[in-house]
Amino acid sequence: MFTLPTLPKLLLIVLVIGAVWWWHRRNQIRRREQAELDRNQRTAATKGAKGKPAKPIEDMAQCRVCNAYVPAIGATRCGRDNCPF
Ligand SMILES: [Zn+2]
């Protein structure tokens, strides 16, 4: 049923296996490079976000009645429901 493959057939099989291996290896390297690039971009984005706060820092003032802290600028009352002020 099975006979020993001739030399040209053996060479063809080795060539096909080699091509598949080379293609697989190339994809692996490309995927690894892409993952590393994504990770670097994510790290850079995180560093950029850490550089400046999402919201500007506001001065806070304490409500004289209920002692709650509210933004000092633009607040006339603390805004809490149980505060009479
Ligand atoms: Zn209050």
Image: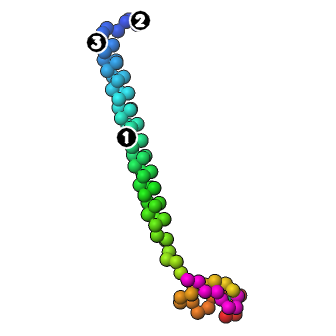
Neighbours of disc 1 within 10 Å: few (<14), some (14-19), many (20+): few
Q: Which comes sooner in the sequence, label 2 or label 3?
A: 2
Work out whether 8 lies above or below 30.
above
Q: Which comes sooner in the sequence, label 3 or label 1?
A: 3
Q: Nearer the viewer, residue 43 or 80?
A: 43
Work out whether 17 lies above or below 54.
above
Q: CA distance from mark 2 to mark 1?
A: 42 Å
Q: Identify residue for label 2.
A: 1
Neighbours of disc 3 within 10 Å: few (<14), some (14-19), many (20+): few
Which residue is found at the position 38% from the left and 32% from the top?
Answer: 25
Q: Position of residue 60 (x, y in %)?
A: 59, 83
Callout 3 amino acid:
Pro
Callout 1 amino acid:
Arg
Q: Are marks 2 and 3 in contact (CB under 8 Å)?
A: no
Q: Is residue 57 visible?
A: yes
Q: Identify residue for label 3.
A: 8
Q: Which comes sooner in the sequence, label 2 or label 1?
A: 2
Q: Secondary structure at mark 2?
A: loop
**Image quarter in which the C terminus is found:** bottom right
